[in-house]
Image (cartoon, rainbow, N blue to C red):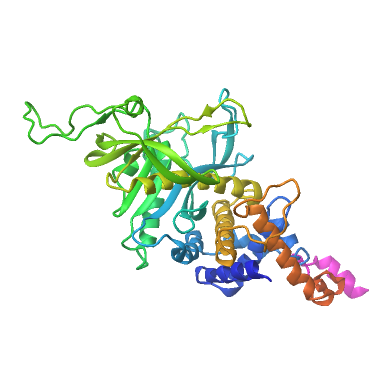
Amino acid sequence: MMKLFHTMDSLLHQWRPAFPQQRTFDRVRRLTYGLLFCQQQHLTSTAICATGRQFQDWSGDYRVCSRSPWDPHDLFKPVIYNAIPLLQPLPAPVLAAMDDTLCKKTGRHIPGVTTGRDPQSPPYHVNLMRGLRFVQTSLLIAPLGFTGPARALPVCFQPAPPALKPKKKAPPEAWNEYRKQKKTLALPQVGLSSVIALREELDLYPETKTRILLISVDGSYTNQVLLKHLPPRTTLIGRIRKDANLSLPLDPNLATKGRPRKYGLKAPTPKEVLDDDSIATQEIPCFAAGKAQTVKVKTFGPVLWSKAGPDKPLRLVVIKPLGYRLRSGSKLLYRDPAFLICTDPNLDLPTLIQAYVYRWEIEVNHRDEKSFIGVAQGQVRTPQAAARLPQLQVAAYALLLLASILAYGFQRTADYLPLPKWRHKSIRPSILDLLNLLRAQILGITCSKGPDETFNHFDASKLTTPKPQKFAKESDRLCEKAA
């Protein structure tokens, strides 16, 4: 059965309204399968070869990302629309996660390239690397009742290039404009625009219009840019420093001298809450690390933080580290505790913990996109293509994940190819399982047509010129005419 391919193809056909012409959509559809099918570097040239069009005119395949007028955000709309039936039943919130990533590049003149910290560098020596910076937002889809691992479906992959720094001898006007753009193009601002866009997209559907959007972020997005400008019906869960300066709500009966106060007495820091034995520890069940776990949690609130403002009460949550052993009988080790704040003090605590634990799935997205999908490996130099091609690859990756859930569910069933002997049985299929199954089904369809229908484009008598030939010189034409 070709269930994965047919489901994937039906989802791909929902891209048709995003493109102005049918032939443009046909090129994008063919290029998408080529990028998923090729096993070398995921370049436009290897995608053309994977679809067997290396002997035909390939100029249109390169122009589809550089010149054709289409919006990359429209490619993620089918993901949201088809993922709504997979959400938890009402009144559960819509879970999402957001993070940024840096796709490695080597050229200095690629539009949008920046220099950032290499995430694979050791902690004792931070290395730098060039790359394209993106901010990704993913919907978290989990089995009913959070009984298994979640899937993170990318719904936004926004380019976040930094502001161009002027030269030292540039006029003051250029430096003032640079300072303004530096704030506008900062990662928190791009993240805020992604959250607002996702909230507006969810408001278009009756099933999610009244639901709360519960989004989990790391410490780089837990700042006043997001906390003070969150859209309505949106709750944020973010990490916070262990020594954060928090305050208690102001007592209205407390008489004070001088100007009116906005914050009450000093609240204990997150580290002090962790060490305070008078604060009760709660055991919350959640699914993490491939099985059901019970984590120990302390909560304190409501509290106020200057980054969020005096009119937004927060809830402080401290998750104690889980113990683990590297091998049977070895020493019991612990990881670092997690200090979180939530903008909704009344949010259900098990839902809060599970939403934060599921946030790890966006890190899995980044690994899959860079290692197996080949995001940003394309050697393009135009500004539009440098931003569009990675978004096209991430949208295709999201459709592939969604197609696997719609076709076979969350579990790894017998429909997938058998695992090698050295691999243990996994709960859900990996991205390699999905790619191998998709390639097997496409090859099955291709080989079933027969050699006359499949490989006729390799016939030299039917080849067309890959590129338009230049007109011959006048002298050459006269010589040919005389002969």
Q: Nearer the viewer, residue 123 or 389?
A: 123
Magenta region includes residue 475: yes
Residue pushed farthest right? 483
Asked where in the image residue 451 lies, by quadrant, the reply is: bottom right
Residue 348 image point, x, y percent: 33, 48
Q: Give left or right: position of 430 versus 241.
A: right
Q: Give left or right: position of 393 versus 173.
A: right
In the image, what residue occupies the spot 71% across and 62% down? 439
Asked where in the image residue 481 lies, by quadrant, the reply is: bottom right
Q: Which residues are magenta?
A: 464-483
Q: Nearer the viewer, residue 279 or 54?
A: 279
Residue 209 image point, x, y percent: 33, 63
In the image, what residue occupies the spot 38% across and 47% down? 350
Q: Give left or right: position of 454 versus 423.
A: right
- Say if residue 378 shows up in the picture: no
Q: Give left or right: position of 127 versus 296.
A: right
Magenta region includes residue 32: no
